[in-house]
Amino acid sequence: MPNPKRKHSKARRDRRRAHDAITPPSVSRCESCGEVKRPHRVCPSCGEYKGREVIEGQDAL
């Protein structure tokens, strides 16, 4: 099995890892209640998605 002849420098290693950072999840506002939610998902506070109620009884929470 081939092995490297020389050790890669820290700069070379860090340049390779430059794109590995974790990005925070994207968020959007609910159209009906204004709470923060993930895009393209049912709002956890009011239960609506695209202007219609998908989950009933979420107002009481």
Image (cartoon, rainbow, N blue to C red):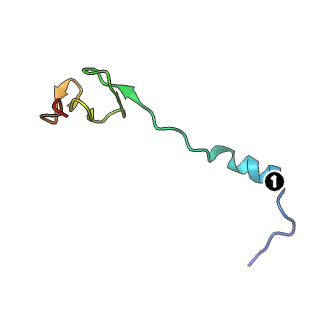
Q: Is residue 8 above or below residue 27?
A: below
Q: Residue at x 24, y 26 (%)?
A: 50
So how many labels did they put on this image? Answer: 1
Q: Return the x and y of residue 36 as percentages of the image width and height.
A: 36, 28
Instruction: Determine whether, in the image, residue 57 is placed left or right of residue 2.
Output: left
Q: Return the x and y of residue 56 as percentages of the image width and height.
A: 12, 35
Q: Quadrant of the C terminus?
A: top left
Q: Return the x and y of residue 12 as percentages of the image width and height.
A: 80, 51
Q: Residue at x 86, y 69 (%)?
A: 5
Q: Residue at x 75, y 47 (%)?
A: 15
Element type where label 1 sits in the image:
helix
Residue farthest to the left, as pictured? 56
Residue farthest to the front, as pictured? 61
Q: Report crowding for label 1: few under 14, some 14 to 19, many 20 or more residues within 10 A (C-alpha).
A: few
Residue farthest to the right, as pictured? 6
Q: Which residue is mark 1?
A: 10
Q: Residue at x 25, y 31 (%)?
A: 45
Q: Return the x and y of residue 17 as percentages of the image width and height.
A: 69, 49
Instruction: Determine whether, in the image, residue 57 is placed left or right of residue 21.
Output: left
Instruction: Determine whether, in the image, residue 2 is placed left or right of residue 36.
Output: right
Quadrant in the rendering for residue 53: top left
Q: Quadrant of the N terminus?
A: bottom right
Q: Nearer the viewer, residue 24 or 16?
A: 24
**Amino acid identity at mark 1:** Lys
Q: Is residue 6 above or below residue 38?
A: below
Q: Nearer the viewer, residue 5 or 10?
A: 10
